[in-house]
Image: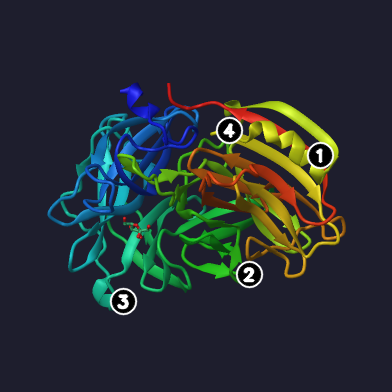
Amino acid sequence: QDSLYHEKNRPQFHFTTRRGWVNDPNGLIYYEGEYHLFYQHNPYEREWENMSWGHAVSKDLTHWDELPVALHPDKLGTMFSGSAVMDYDNTAGFNKGKTPAMVAFYTADNPDREIQCVAYSLDKGRTWTKYEKNPVIDSKDKWNSKDTRDPKVFWYKPGKHWVMVLNERDGHSIYNSNNLKDWKFESHVTGFWECPDLFELPVDGDKNKTKWVMYGASGTYMLGSFDGKVFTPETGKLLYTTGSIYAAQTYSNIPESDGRRIQIGWGRVAQPGMAFNNMMLLPTELKLHATKNGIRLYNMPVSETSQLFERTNQWTGLKSDDANQKLKEFYSADKIRIKTTFKLSHATSAGFNLFGQRVIDYDMNNNTINGVFYSPADMTSMELTADIYVDRTSIEVFIDGGAYSYSMERKPNSDNKEGFHFWGNNIEVKNLEVYSAKSIWK
Ligand code: FRU
């Protein structure tokens, strides 16, 4: 089975399936040493169809084992996106002896409606039993809309009850429950679409100063407070990531001793000519930092990722032409990581190209990166730091320690002899590091 992963265009350090279509990550949960990654999956074809929950597990968020499909379509519909929790207190009554149930929430989609359903597993997510009284929520008539989907459930400790965030028509609704089966509508925040998540994070690691983050599928978020029933926004819409990423979700049941908020996003990255399609982006850690622009959500690859990369070169204080010379030897790399800090001057536009593709295009006049508004926290030095992960079919860029990040398809242009290069007027490359990348497949 390992040899299946040796195809020419198989991403080398991103999760992909043996075959078939992949979209949203679902049911992200850590339990007994395993990170579970369920995902929207068509096991049979490269196209979106037959939605099922695929399943993979990892011990280190880096190397993945693909397991059999976890949830198959049934008479209520196909298996759309959702989440999972551990029910340690047996609130739903699914537990067996001392074995707590892993409980999944998903949307069953049928031609008429989208309804919220429950399933549970007593064997570490390997096999699942669907709750016989599904669905637990059917809210189409209330919203006069079929768009009611993507339940994300978590335990609200202060109130000792479960919370579900559910996308309903034009935003995210909050529901409460004591038993994971009976759900009561509490409130609604408009202006989000698909795949909600809601979680609390400390600001600069200070547990006494926290904010709640509400996000949707496209990289937009709001900060605010949450009392278990109502999310009260304290900001407008903000943006932490763009590009190929969509429908990201964060892990549940991460031990308190770890305490990280770990996210995986879907990479809408076409895999031309392959038996599989799309991929998962690198797992990242989300943090809140106070900046000159206010409190902002930061997104950086989890520390486990670093085991895949070995630094082979570092240069400091280069003119861009010299840096471009140094980079020539890496033109044929199929997987590589490049870290750089560069200083802009005299340029309305400057940046970094890889394989003829504008990976960083910073416009000082409009304060945009690749067309998206970005205001560096430190405007005086005009320095930009980028951590760039280049795989066979994708590129992920983390700017200024994760203040903004984006992802894109890698589109190798065979006619382009430029390989990697900095461009713009009087660019000073203060730091340039090159890392070789290991494959996650055996
Ligand atoms: C987001 C989404 C979800 C839905 C799923 C279906 O990409 O449209 O809202 O549950 O994909 O595959």
Figure label count: 4
3D distance between C-alphas at marks 3 and 1: 60 Å
3D distance between C-alphas at marks 3 and 2: 26 Å
Q: Which residue is disc 3 drawn over? A: 143
3D distance between C-alphas at marks 1 and 4: 19 Å
Q: Earlier in the sequence, mark 3 or mark 1?
A: 3
Q: Earlier in the sequence, mark 4 or mark 2?
A: 2
| Residue that lies at the very extreme toward the bottom in this rendered image | 144
Residue mark closest to the camera, 3 vs 1: 1
In the image, taking residue 335 as reference, residue 353 lies left or right, namely right
Rendered view: 52 above or below 441: below
The label number, if any, that marks residue 322 in the structure image: 1
Q: Residue at x 52, y 38 (%)?
A: 391
| Residue that lies at the very extreme toward the left in this rendered image | 75
In the image, taking residue 181 as reference, residue 13 lies left or right, namely right
Structural crowding at the residue carrying mark 3, measured as other residues with C-alpha within 10 Å and reported as few (<14), some (14–19) or many (≥20): few
Q: Residue at x 61, y 34 (%)?
A: 303
Quadrant housing residue 335: top right
Q: Which residue is disc 4 drawn over? A: 333
Q: Position of residue 175 (x, y in %)?
A: 38, 63
Q: Earlier in the sequence, mark 3 or mark 2?
A: 3
Element at label 3:
helix
Quadrant housing residue 280: top left
Residue mark closest to the camera, 4 vs 3: 4
Kind of residue at badge 1: Asp
Rendered view: 378 above or below 9: below
Kind of residue at badge 2: Thr
